[in-house]
Image (cartoon, coloured by chain):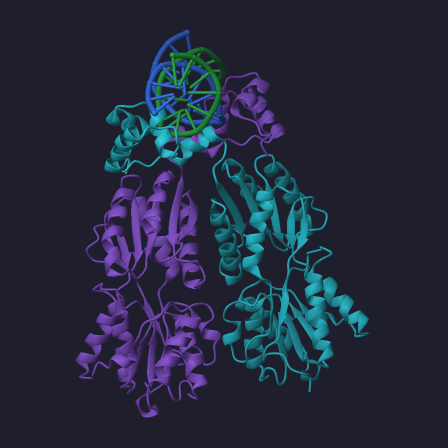
Chain colours: A purple, B cyan, C blue, D green
Amino acid sequence: MADHYTIYDIAAEAGVSIATVSRVMRGEASVSPKTRAKVDAVISRLNYRPSSIARGMTSKTTNALGILLPKLLNPNYAMIFTGANDAARRRGYSMTLFPWHSITGQQEHQTLALAERRLDGVIICVEYMPDNEREQFLTDLKKLRQYMPIVLIGCVPRTYDFPAISYNMAGIVRESVSALIGLGHRRIALVGGMESDRDELRRDVGYQECLKDARLPYVSSYRVFCGGRVEDGEAAFDSMLSGLQKNFWPTAVVALNDLVAMGCAAAARRHGLSIPGDISVLGCDNIFCAPYLTPPLASIDMHQQQLGARAVELLLSGENIREEAQWEMIMRGSVAPCR
Amino acid sequence: MADHYTIYDIAAEAGVSIATVSRVMRGEASVSPKTRAKVDAVISRLNYRPSSIARGMTSKTTNALGILLPKLLNPNYAMIFTGANDAARRRGYSMTLFPWHSITGQQEHQTLALAERRLDGVIICVEYMPDNEREQFLTDLKKLRQYMPIVLIGCVPRTYDFPAISYNMAGIVRESVSALIGLGHRRIALVGGMESDRDELRRDVGYQECLKDARLPYVSSYRVFCGGRVEDGEAAFDSMLSGLQKNFWPTAVVALNDLVAMGCAAAARRHGLSIPGDISVLGCDNIFCAPYLTPPLASIDMHQQQLGARAVELLLSGENIREEAQWEMIMRGSVAPCR
DNA sequence: CTGAAAGCGCTTACAG
DNA sequence: CTGAAAGCGCTTACAG
């Protein structure tokens, strides 16, 4: 390293001006074949590569996009990234991944840190957010917008005036719970999410509406909050079951995501329940391993790759549109009629 | 966007020179409290954020590292990224992920494209490589090295003179197959990898050595090559079973990775085999869902987070060391004695 | 403690 | 078709 050449070295070596080297590098037509050949020879002999950062200095555009995602430990986010990355490449942009340090806290630092990069745009995946952080986050987004276009994806509060592709969590849970009610279930648990989340599209809204429509009671014991990992779901559901007499155990559980669903399934089995005989389990995200679990895990396919790709399009279009992400229920063996 | 301010705007607004603004931004001590307060006020009023690219222009260092990984669809790579990213942050560096477009082809383009970024270093994950591409790849690496320090991880050929943390695939397979032989298995399949790979650390070497030591025949029907996804393993193992009389079916299978192992298990079940009763399955990488499969999938834990973190240390140390990655066999219900 | 000035490595009008 | 020169937005000796 460090022993690389600059445009001056190439120009000197080839006996031309740096402007000419620049033209050759950029493939401009206005260079004589002879000169081009001479310069090209030097470039490849010395392995010259222009500095994208010097380039960015002058050209005001970097052909680089960014995407801010929660930690990749959930394969779900890897899919979003893949979709976005592929779409960006097709349009001639690079896509850089920035993982959130944590969902809450120090977001000011993180969101605004992006402003220092001169990206041509950034996609930000919004997760559950406690009510008290929402204001600050919005402020940061507005500041960041001074520096680059932004597209939000995920659980985007309705009040945010940004181009966005949002998940209608309420709608998803409504359909999930309806399906289970349709199968005869009456005691349906909902596991995952943050209690402090007050968005009107959050899962709880759909859950409660749906119970109400079916004239079923809202039983707060059936609603537990937890993080998004397998262990979180396992611990949360374990303690729900431990805290209830067997004849009050839920006969179905809707989980925040597939990881949490896997945890719920493990906890249920530990308590002697069989799936789906004793309890149905419905996840969300349809991660790659869902069909390979025993029984195969029913889930909601969020079309993550499409989502990522669409976010890139939206970002590059510059339009201030708000869309809703597509999704699709995938029924599998982990869900069965209530017996 | 585009309506952001530069250091000149701040200087003018605060009535100081740009040098002073720079000093305030960088937190230098040699600024009077009064001046600092005045400048800080303007900075926060205008949401000024310095351009990291202009900064990189002058300071010759970007505090940015990169990591080149295969597509993230295997959670394994997400773990490596997470480990590397966390370690980088602790040392004050950012970590940018570059996914390989594909394992083979257009690598020239990709590897060298990195040279244009002025990163302070890059970690490159090397996957199986056909013999005929190895030379070209090495050439590219040498060119890239002119621009930034490199650390290689993964299946790194012994002949490469680069700092590296390599997987001893031969050793891993040797131990896997030994363990199965110790459990009484005699017909052991190996699924995954590329036939054209000729590295001396590749799986096949360990496989063949181990069979030889146990004076077992090398049965080429038990060795199938395939890609790294679940479907690949499923198709490959399905056709192996379909092509053999039942009494020659393997009683154990060692898979390239856990995804391929999941595919093998699915194919085995489709052929009426139970796991581990009729056939043992051993994966590799110990991805998060391995313990939640039925039966739980035995695997090799590659300590990916540690690997990623160690690669960052090595990169920043500047030492030209070659290490071997740690690993550990995790026995689970998918492996049992041969009956 | 503060400022004027040079320089980082490119691109891009502007001349010729 | 080619070159001299200005400029991108910072940092950093060098003076004072």
Between residue A40 and residue B150, name the one nearer to us: B150
Relative image position of residue B179 (x, y in whole percent)? 70, 75
Task: Name the residue: 22% across, 70% down.
Answer: A205
Quarter-wise, where is residue B250 in the image?
bottom right
Up-down relation of residue A81 to residue B32 (above or below)? below
Q: Residue B133 placed where, x, y %?
A: 65, 48
Q: Quadrant of residue B4?
A: top left
Q: Is residue B231 above or below residue B150?
A: below
Q: Is residue A205 left or right of residue A150?
A: left
B287 with respect to A106 (left or right): right
Residue plotted at (26% across, 58% down): A156
The picture places residue A204, in percent across and down from the top left corner, at 24, 71
- Where residue A284 sits in the image (x, y, percent)? 36, 70
Image quadrant containing the N terminus of chain A? top right
Placement of the C terminus of chain A among the 4 image quadrants: bottom left
Q: Is residue A162 above or below residue A236?
A: above
Residue under the point 60% across and 43% down: B317
